[in-house]
Every structure is written in C-alpha cells, then in structure tokens.
Image: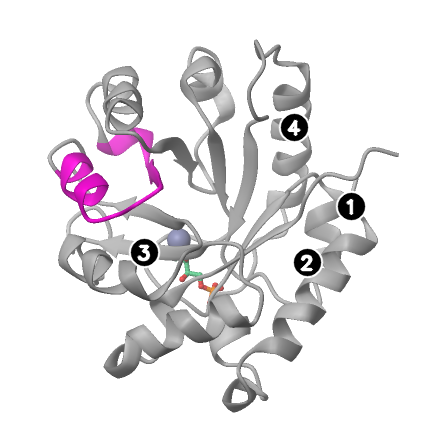
Amino acid sequence: MNIAPIRIAPSILSADFSQLGEEVRAIEAAGADLVHFDVMDNHYVPNLTIGPLVCEAIRPHVSIPIDVHLMVEPVDALVPMFAKAGANIISFHPEASRHVDRTLGLIRDHGCRAGLVLNPATPLGVLDHTLDKLDLVLLMSVNPGFGGQKFIDSTLDKLQQVRARIDSHLRDGGEPIWLEVDGGVNAGNIADIARAGADTFVAGSAVFGAPDAGGGYRTIMQRLRDEATKFAR
Ligand code: DX5
Ligand code: ZN
C-alpha cells in the first residue's frame, strides 16, 4: 500500500501571542510539520489577527514551512509581503480575488506554493481550471474567522470528492497536490478526516488547548498523528 504522508499544521491562532517565538519552537520540537498562520482582516472575515511583520518575527524561530492562510480581501498586495516575510505556502479564498488565476501565478512567481481555500458553501467548480496552478487545496470545515468551532460533518463528503479530483488530475512530475482541512479537527475526528482523503491537518485549539500543553505539545501531536495514520491511504 502506498502510504501518503500525514502533515500536522498547528494553527498559532490559538497559541499564546505573548510568547509566539517560544510557542512555534515548541510545536516544531513536538513534531509539527507546518506552522499554520491565520491572517484575518476584519473585512473578508469579522476577526482581525496578524500580518507579515509577525510572520517575519517568527521565521527565525523555526525551520518548518510557514503555511499562510489569507482570509483577506483583496489578496494580491499581501502576496509579495508574505513571501518576503518568509512564508512558504500562501493560500487564499477565490471569492476574495478578482483574478484567481493571476493570484495563483503571483504566489508561485514569488517562490511560494499556492493554495485555494474553499469555504463550507463554496462549490468545487473553482477547481475546474485551476488544478495545474495549485499546490494545495484547503477545505474549510468551519466558517472562517474564529478558532475553536465545531467541525462541519458534510466536509467529509466534500473531501472525498476533492480527493478523487486530485488523484485523477495528471501532473507532469512534481509533488502531488496536498489536501488540507481546517477547522474543528481533533483527536476524536482526525481518523475519519484522514479516511475521507485529507493528508494535511490544521489543528488550533486541539493542540494549544491540550491538557498537556505545558508539557510541550508532544503528547497531543503524537496522538493526532497516530489517529490520522490509522487510516492513511
Ligand atoms: C479559522 C482558521 C483556523 C482555526 C482553526 O478561520 O482558519 O485555522 O484557527 O482552529 P481550530 O482548530 O480551533 O478549529
Ligand atoms: Zn486557517
């Protein structure tokens, strides 16, 4: 069996912002594969969070990739800023960019991997003409804007559909498109999410709010990975 890699991406939205450097070092030491970085603009989403300056500030603290999730509108002006600040992956919501194809190209031109984020009610048609320019599809399993929400179960069916599309999309070499899920992921549901086809798992409150959080996040990270690996494809 071909075991696809499992990637765990703790969302620092739920971290202690008063000591972010320490927090990202702790998740890397605990085995995180990516740092998930939630950017909210109080326009595309009601909440307001962090920008390129904070990305630049945490960059020297970790060697794992920084996975920037832009919940902003418009998108393009922030792409070069985040690339310069050390982002490795930049994802955006297609309805927030007037020219989706151009924004995807812009992200890659700046040396980053490009992702599209689909909200719970966003149909999959946006993938029809974009898969060639995509490195990652991020399915929201909550409505974007806040951490700590409940996983929306219909995401499982949607994940299966996106998985089928990715698997049947012919790539001329290179790494397969990642399928990431974001919102309400925890140790109790990650196995079902992995079985539905996700390979990359954002977890905010499940990691930073874990009971052993003081112990450096190792136990929760291992638990998430073990559960997800149970059903690795
Ligand atoms: C929501 C953010 C998520 C969020 C996930 O808009 O995109 O990354 O932080 O948090 P949890 O894992 O707590 O649902
Ligand atoms: Zn996110």
Give the percent coordinates (x, y) of residue 98.
Answer: 19, 22
Q: In which quarter of the image is the C terminus?
A: top right
Q: Quadrant of the N terminus?
A: top right
Give the percent coordinates (x, y) of residue 44.
Answer: 21, 46
Q: Name the residue under label 2.
A: 190
Label 3, ligand 2: CB separation under 8 Å? yes
Q: Name the residue under label 3.
A: 38
State which tag comes first along the sequence, 3 or 2. Answer: 3
Q: Distance between the residues labelled 1 and 3?
A: 26 Å
> What residue appears at the point 48 percent right and 17 percent down from the top-left corner?
131
Q: How far apart are marks 4 and 3 (CA)?
A: 25 Å
Front one among 198 and 118: 198
> What residue appears at the point 46 percent right and 75 percent down from the top-left corner?
26
Front one among 25 and 177: 25
Is residue 129 positioned above or below 110 on the image?
above
Region of the chain picked out in magenta, as a range? 78-96
Q: Mark 4 points at which residue?
A: 161
Q: Distance between the residues labelled 2 and 4?
A: 18 Å
Q: Is residue 172 left or right of residue 15?
A: right
State which tag comes first along the sequence, 4 or 3. Answer: 3
Q: Distance between the residues labelled 3 and 2?
A: 20 Å
